[in-house]
Image (tube, rainbow, N blue to C red):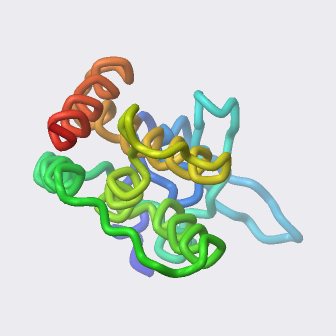
Amino acid sequence: MTKSKKLEFRPNDYVVYPAHGVGQIISIEEQEVAGYSLELFVISFEKDKMTLRVPTNKITESGLRSLSSPDVISQAMKTLKGKAKVKRAMWSRRAQEYEQKINSGDLISIAEVVRDLHRTDDQREQSYSERQLYEAALERLTREVAAVSGSDEIAAAKQVDEVLTSRAA
């Protein structure tokens, strides 16, 4: 991997790590591991009170990416407006697919999960695991919308909610 590719992320940049969502690079540090010097991105996930160290040379494999472009955000919002697609597969199989979409780090896939699991008040009850997956996907989507638009999560959540409720109408 070339040096130029490696340093496309800088301290203070917001990034998306597939398994954890939006985080912020707080520094780049050198660490010695088993006699080798390793350069690491130190990423803070403030909401989860978690810090992750990702070797700069493992960025591609880790799936770390920049925040979505405003275009992708509006595509995700369009996805939310769509009709829920619920496969007739067994729940365990569907749950696994939803989980994979959430952890893919792909915003459109995450929006699909939100769309497919969203329930209005008059719809049938959600199971505990459905609600867990829905909330995980919704949180990922909301945090990225907030980070991209530079607004807070409350405003972003309102924006997402408006799209979801307009769909139900």
Place of residue 161 in the rendered image (x, y in percent of width and height, measured from the top left): 29, 31
In this picture, is 38 found above or below 117?
Answer: below
In this picture, is 62 found above or below 108?
Answer: below
Quarter of the image where one finds residue 106: bottom left
> Who's the residue at 69% across and 37% down the image?
50
> Who's the residue at 17% across and 43% down the image?
167
Place of residue 144 in the rendered image (x, y in percent of width and height, measured from the top left): 35, 41
Instruction: Locate residue 90 relative to residue 164 in the image: left or right.
Output: right
Can residue 24 be seen from the camera position used here? yes
Can residue 57 be seen from the camera position used here? no
> Who's the residue at 49% across and 60% down the image?
102
In this picture, is 22 found above or below 79?
Answer: above
Instruction: Locate residue 160 relative to residue 54 in the image: left or right.
Output: left
Quarter of the image where one finds residue 154: top left
Instruction: Locate residue 105 relative to residue 36 in the image: left or right.
Output: left
How many labels sit on residues? Answer: 0
> Who's the residue at 88% across and 70% down the image?
34
Foreground pick, 142 / 78: 78
